[in-house]
């Protein structure tokens, strides 16, 4: 992409309304634009990152055996009356009337709808297990939308729903998602710690929130420091290996980790002094087993091996990709701007042409741009007629991991400068070496 043809509305001033660094940087870098309280448009740069986050989530959901579907955002209130949640959900639900005075709503989550899809199509235990997910916009009329897309009213969610014959099956489905989440967050370049979460009237221990530590997080968290050094499961993990997956989950739940809601001060205090981490955290994912809470009232049953109809055991599994984008910035930035993990950077390489109009410089930039693009690398080529300082500031602000700085001085010696955004390391290399290093 040539920057001269791109839409990158960068703000020079710090937007006053932004209280935390991710919100500030997302606005400054032209990633998002607020359209109403807690409702955002995603501009080209922001959407690139969001799509990369979604792609990783999708790959790991698919790897675990979950199947992608797409459910609508607008739902009929009748479904929610069946589960009893239409009245219970309260003011967070955006309720809408259509022209025929029918009660509709903008989905804050999809348990009812997916249960309806299931009951209309699945009859036998032989069709289980089943896990259906989608990546779709949700609306929750949050009391205090704030921090940009971190706590917005309209936000993107990957929500998966598992269906099993019994508790044992449901537990394996839960473990699959647990392991998929560990892999997803590791690939996104963050250390997310699974923490015990409230199970409410369902009981049991099958609910975990995945949090990353950040000083601006809204949750208060307590955990064992060793979690930060754990190695995530490998790509070849066998999702059908019941005992193997249980072993991974056991390891990742063996040490103390809880948010303030489930905090056990005595257990935490018993940890060695240097193992205690007491910090703030951001909830980026949440997995939950809820048994027959929806299947029983909504009559989502299957015919079991003994010929009897039984309500299926379900779980739901959420990740907020739009919140993840903000959380990645909270975890990766400096005074100059964003430092993206390579996997989700909007462009992997930025090329700064320091003297637009100079034949040699233009030709060198064109050569690098063409070769990298041909190699399938996302490149942003700053071909604008701008001061070098402004170009450096832009590339650092938007967080391009690798930056190639091309100017007549360096080219006179046959060299371009290769800068690493994260480490700040700069190397003078030939154009050919530069291409070898980046491809
Ligand atoms: P929170 O405690 O932050 O309100 P939640 O527990 O209500 O979140 P869940 O119902 O567990 O959220 O939804 C799954 C995921 O959706 C969350 O882990 C989070 O990543 C994301 N999410 C929830 N609410 C929002 C929001 N208002 N803005 C952005 N992402 C959100
Ligand atoms: Mg909430
Ligand atoms: Mg929560
Ligand atoms: Mg939650």
Image (cartoon, helix red, strand yellow):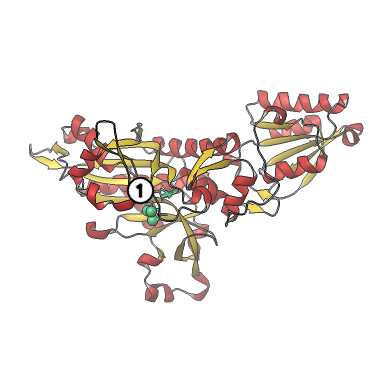
In the rendered image, residue 270, in percent from the top left (x then y), is placed at 42, 76
Q: Mark 1 packing: few (<14 Cα in 10 Å), some, or many (20+)?
A: many
Q: Is any part of residue 238 visible from this angle?
A: no
Q: In terms of secondary structure, where does tag 1 sit?
A: helix
Is 277 or 202 nearer to us in this picture? 202
User: Could you tell whether 290 is left or right of 15 in the image?
Assistant: left
Is 290 or 305 nearer to us in this picture? 290
Is 354 or 411 nearer to us in this picture? 354
In the rendered image, residue 407, in percent from the top left (x then y), is placed at 85, 34
User: Could you tell whether 189 is left or right of 410 in the image?
Assistant: left
Q: Quadrant of the N terminus?
A: top right
In the rendered image, residue 378, in percent from the top left (x then y), is placed at 64, 31
Which quadrant of the view contains residue 433? top right
User: Could you tell whether 8 is left or right of 276 in the image?
Assistant: right
Vertical comparison of 307 with 397: above or below: above
In the rendered image, residue 285, in percent from the top left (x then y), is placed at 42, 50
Q: Is mark 1 within 8 Å of ligand 1?
A: no
Tell me which residue sits at (54%, 49%) in the image: 326
Q: Quadrant of the C terminus?
A: top right
Residue with the mark numbered 1: 245
Q: How many marks?
A: 1
Tell me which residue sits at (52%, 38%) in the image: 41
Vertical comparison of 2 with 213: above or below: above
Q: Is any part of residue 266 visible from this angle?
A: yes
């Amino acid at each position: 992409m040539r920057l001269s043809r791109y839409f990158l509305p960068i703000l020079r001033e710090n937007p006053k309304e932004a209280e935390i660094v991710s919100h500030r940087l997302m606005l400054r870098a032209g990633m998002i634009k607020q359209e109403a309280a807690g409702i955002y448009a995603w501009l080209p740069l922001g959407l690139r990152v969001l799509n990369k986050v979604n792609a990783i989530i999708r790959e790991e959901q698919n790897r675990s055996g979950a199947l992608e579907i797409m459910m609508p955002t607008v739902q009929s209130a009748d479904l929610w009356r069946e589960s009893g949640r239409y009245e219970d959900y309260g003011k967070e639900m955006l309720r809408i009337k259509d022209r025929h005075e029918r009660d509709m709503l903008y989905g804050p989550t999809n348990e009812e709808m997916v249960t309806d899809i299931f009951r209309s199509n699945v009859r036998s235990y032989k069709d289980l297990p089943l896990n259906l997910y989608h990546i779709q916009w949700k609306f929750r009329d949050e009391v205090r939308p704030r921090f940009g897309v971190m706590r917005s009213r309209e936000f993107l969610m990957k929500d998966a729903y598992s269906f099993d014959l019994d508790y044992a099956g449901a537990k394996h489905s839960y473990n699959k998602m647990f392991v998929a989440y560990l892999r997803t967050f590791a690939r996104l370049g963050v250390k997310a710690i699974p923490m015990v979460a409230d199970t409410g009237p369902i009981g049991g221990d099958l609910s975990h929130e995945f949090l990353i530590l950040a000083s601006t997080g809204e949750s208060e968290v307590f955990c064992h420091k060793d979690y930060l050094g754990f190695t995530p499961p490998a790509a070849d993990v066998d999702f059908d290996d019941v005992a193997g997956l249980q072993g991974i989950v056991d390891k990742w739940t063996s040490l103390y980790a809880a948010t303030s809601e489930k905090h056990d001060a005595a257990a935490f205090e018993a940890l060695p002094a240097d193992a205690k981490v007491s910090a703030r955290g951001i909830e980026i994912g949440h997995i939950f087993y809820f048994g027959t809470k929806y299947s029983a009232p909504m009559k989502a049953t299957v015919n079991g091996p003994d010929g009897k109809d039984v309500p299926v055991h379900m779980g739901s599994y959420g990740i907020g990709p739009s919140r993840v984008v903000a959380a990645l910035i909270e975890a990766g930035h400096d005074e100059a701007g964003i430092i993206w993990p390579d996997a989700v950077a909007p462009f992997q390489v930025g090329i700064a042409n320091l003297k637009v109009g100079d034949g040699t410089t233009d030709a060198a930039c064109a050569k690098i741009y063409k070769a990298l693009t041909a190699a399938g690398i996302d490149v942003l080529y700053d071909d604008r007629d701008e001061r070098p300082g402004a170009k450096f500031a832009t590339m650092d602000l938007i967080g391009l991991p690798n930056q190639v700085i091309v100017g007549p001085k360096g080219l006179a010696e046959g060299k371009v400068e290769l800068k690493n955004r994260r480490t700040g390391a700069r190397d003078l290399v030939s154009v050919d070496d530069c291409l070898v290093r980046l491809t």
